[in-house]
Amino acid sequence: MTQAPPPAVNPPVDGWRKVFTALRHRNFRLFFWGQLISLIGTWMDKTAEGWLIYRLTGSKVLLGVIAAAGTAPMIFFSFWGGSIADRLPKRSILVVTQTCAMLLAFTEACLVWSGLVRPWQIVILATFGGIVLAFDMPARQSFVIEMTSREDLMNAISLNSTIVNGARLIGPSLAGIIMAQAGIAPCFLFDGLSFLAVIAGLLMMNPPRQIPTAHTGSTLKHALGGLAYVRQNRRVFILLSLFSVVGVFGWSYAVLMPSFARDVLHLDAAGYGALMSASGLGALIGALVTAWMGQSMPRRPAVLGGVWLFSSMLFLFSTTRIFALALLFLAIGGFGMMIFFSTSNTLVQTSVPDEMRGRVMGVWALIFGGMIPIGSLEAGALARWVGTPATIAFGAVVCALAALVTWLNIRSRPSSPT
């Protein structure tokens, strides 16, 4: 099994310095900055890809198909990804997955630049990207403790969410500007180049030595061990169930953003990028607040309140036709979503033993890969019949009701994080 770094004696920190305590670990600093650059490129890619598909076809359904293709392979491969993360050095896994993702981005850039790009090619590239993600996500999530310490794990998870959403803020804005000035292809090129930063950071690390995990039984039984653990752990099961519903009916709003921007608010590429960035700004603030408050944050209100805040803002967003209000609602909604996501992610990772973390995060990846494609297809198909605003409003209501059901299920239990 992986040997986590020995606990270090560190001086206490106060104030806003508490937000960045995990950065005192060199390995995590390398990961932090490399991931930030790489994820900016990833969000540029996602933003440009949605705009490209909608410009080529004008199909809301195809927007959902592309989003589903990018994560659906995780349904079939995430168990294996989690098993491998518990058995092999996670840094080596990440170097391979990040290199594969880089090659896919360069391929997409070449297709767009040549003028030969077709929707079916984007679907195939997105599918390969989903396969890569199925092995990357469990290793990346469970690698955090090896780069830091158990003492700083919660802060590191929150900071990891911070860079994801910092990139989500910067990437779409840059993509909108670049698409307006230079076209779509440079966005994919920058995405490919950005992977060099995270690969370099991984190669410069000095992670703890990983001892292969001894296990009996078949490889399949080992891979499915995470699912068995989740079924037995009520806290983790409840969190992942709520995460599933929000994944299907909540996060799918992003799939419809090109349609909402162009057809409802009548915006250009720059306006579309601004909408995507507004949600990222709110999520970034939410991740920073979570990192700052740490153990003092009341978990149950954070999980449920985050979903309710996100749902209410998403509903208001679906009703507005004013650009400034749309930005405000998306920002506040992004804040609520990140409070929910960071808190639930932290609770899951701190509730499992080290030797199970990769496989449990494989289940997390399975839900991410299974629910979000379903949500993407549901959103695209429903929007075709009832329209984009009504589809987004419907998803908001379902998420709010799911949080209510969760609260009714746990309210009789003694006070606990969930």
Image (spheres, helix red, strand yellow):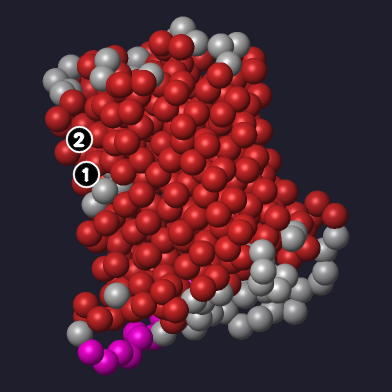
Where does the image place residue 141, in percent across and percent down from the top left? Answer: 46, 62
Report if residue 395 is visible in the image: yes
Residue for point 53% across, 23% down: 318
Q: List the residue tagged with mark 2.
A: 123
Does the magenta segment cover residue 370? no
- Magenta residues? 205-217
Please, is residue 297 above or below residue 335 in the view?
A: below
Where does the image place residue 181, in percent across and percent down from the top left? Answer: 42, 11
Report if residue 162 is visible in the image: no
Q: Nearer the viewer, residue 299 or 36?
A: 299
The three-letter code of the residue at mark 2 reads Val
Label 1 neighbour load within 10 Å: few <14, some 14-19, many 20+: many
| Label ID, residue 127 | 1
User: CB of mark 2 within 8 Å of CB of mark 1?
Assistant: yes
Does the magenta segment cover residue 208? yes
Please, is residue 360 above or below residue 289 in the view?
A: below
Residue for point 23% across, 89% down: 217
Residue for point 41% across, 74% down: 231
- Tag 1's secondary structure? helix
Please, is residue 69 above or below residue 380 in the view?
A: below
Q: Nearer the viewer, residue 201 or 38?
A: 38
Label 2, label 1: how far apart the Cα atoms are: 6 Å
Residue at the outermost top position: 266
Question: 399 left or right of 191?
Answer: right
Question: Magenta-highlighted stretch: main secondary structure?
Answer: loop
Residue at the outermost right position: 14
Where does the image place residue 267, in percent across and percent down from the top left? Answer: 47, 9
